[in-house]
Image (cartoon, rainbow, N blue to C red):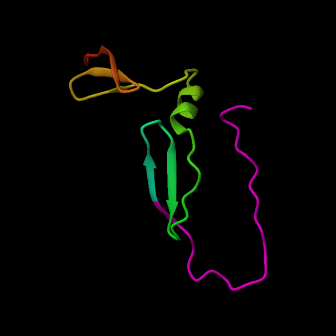
């Protein structure tokens, strides 16, 4: 399975009252493992998505790294090098 493949979506139609308000995104958050979690306005929390892995895979990699304000290159919370602006 490719990390960049979306799963088919399902819409279930059942008897009952119409929603009182449209559902919207209340918050989006990353956890320490790079998973993206979305909370909806009705307080439904969607399953975490391995977002960092998917972004890295799109660029041919396996992980993302970050640079802090001091130019330290970090991977998995550990310094792996330094960078400087040119």
Number of numbered discs: 0
- Quarter of the rendering containing residue 45: bottom right
Compared to residue 70, the image places residue 28 above or below, namely: below
Determine if the magenta segment contains residue 8.
yes
Q: Residue at x 55, y 22 (%)?
A: 62
Q: Residue at x 74, y 32 (%)?
A: 1
Pick out the residue farthest to the left: 70
Left or right: residue 53 versus residue 70 is: right
Left or right: residue 26 versus residue 49 is: left
The magenta segment: 1-26
* Residue 72 image position (x, y, % from top left): 27, 20
Q: Residue at x 74, y 55 (%)?
A: 9
- Quarter of the rendering containing residue 2: top right
Near-viewer residue (49 or 20)? 49
Determine if the magenta segment contains residue 79.
no
Near-viewer residue (53 or 32)? 32
Q: Main secondary structure of the magenta part?
A: loop
Pick out the residue farthest to the bottom: 17
Left or right: residue 24 versus residue 74 is: right
- Quarter of the rendering containing residue 30: top left
* Residue 59 image position (x, y, % from top left): 55, 24
Q: Residue at x 58, y 33 (%)?
A: 54
Pick out the residue farthest to the top: 81
* Residue 46 image position (x, y, % from top left): 58, 56
Rendered-image quadrant of the C terminus: top left
């Amino acid at each position: 399975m490719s990390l960049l493949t979306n799963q088919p979506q399902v819409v279930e139609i059942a008897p009952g009252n119409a929603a009182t308000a449209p559902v919207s995104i209340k918050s989006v958050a990353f956890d320490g493992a790079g998973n993206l979690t979305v909370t909806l306005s009705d307080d439904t929390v969607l399953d975490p998505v391995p977002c960092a892995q998917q972004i890295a895979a799109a660029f041919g990699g396996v992980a993302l790294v970050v640079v802090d304000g001091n130019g330290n290159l970090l991977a998995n919370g550990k310094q792996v090098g330094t960078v400087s602006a040119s």
